[in-house]
Image: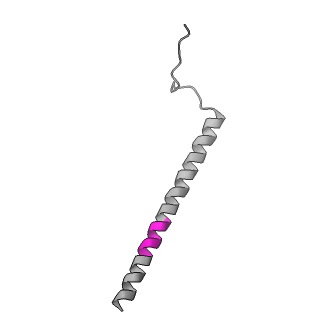
Amino acid sequence: MAERQDPKTPGKKASPREDRLKAALKANMARRKAQMRARAAQDTTESRKGANEESS
């Protein structure tokens, strides 16, 4: 039987496809985090705005 090589063997370079996928995933996660932060900031702004209108 042939021996299996460990895929995480040091010295084995990732394929260009894996590099592209990793970069795309990282960019996608950054975009999603930015969207969540923007929505959270918008929600807090709207809740403050609503609280100010009620107290007037």
Q: Residue furthest top?
A: 1
Residue 40 included in the magenta stretch of the image? yes
Q: Residue at x 36, y 87 (%)?
A: 54
Q: Residue at x 52, y 52 (%)?
A: 29
Relative to 36, residue 21 above or below:
above
Q: Quadrant of residue 50?
A: bottom left
Relative to 14, residue 28 above or below:
below
Image coordinates for residue 30, horizontal then vertical, percent: 53, 54
Q: Residue furthest right?
A: 16
- Residue in front for this viewpoint, 55 or 11: 55
The N terminus lies in which quarter of the figure?
A: top right
Residue 7 included in the magenta stretch of the image? no
- Residue in front for this viewpoint, 32 or 22: 32
Q: Residue furthest left?
A: 55
Q: How many marks?
A: 0
Image coordinates for residue 27, horizontal then vertical, percent: 57, 51
Looking at the image, residue 12 sits to the left or right of residue 48; the answer is right
Secondary structure mostly seen in magenta is helix
Relative to 34, residue 23 above or below:
above
User: What is the magenta range?
Assistant: 38-45
Image coordinates for residue 25, horizontal then vertical, percent: 56, 46
Q: Residue at x 36, y 92 (%)?
A: 56
Coloring applied to the structure:
one colour
Q: Residue furthest bottom?
A: 56
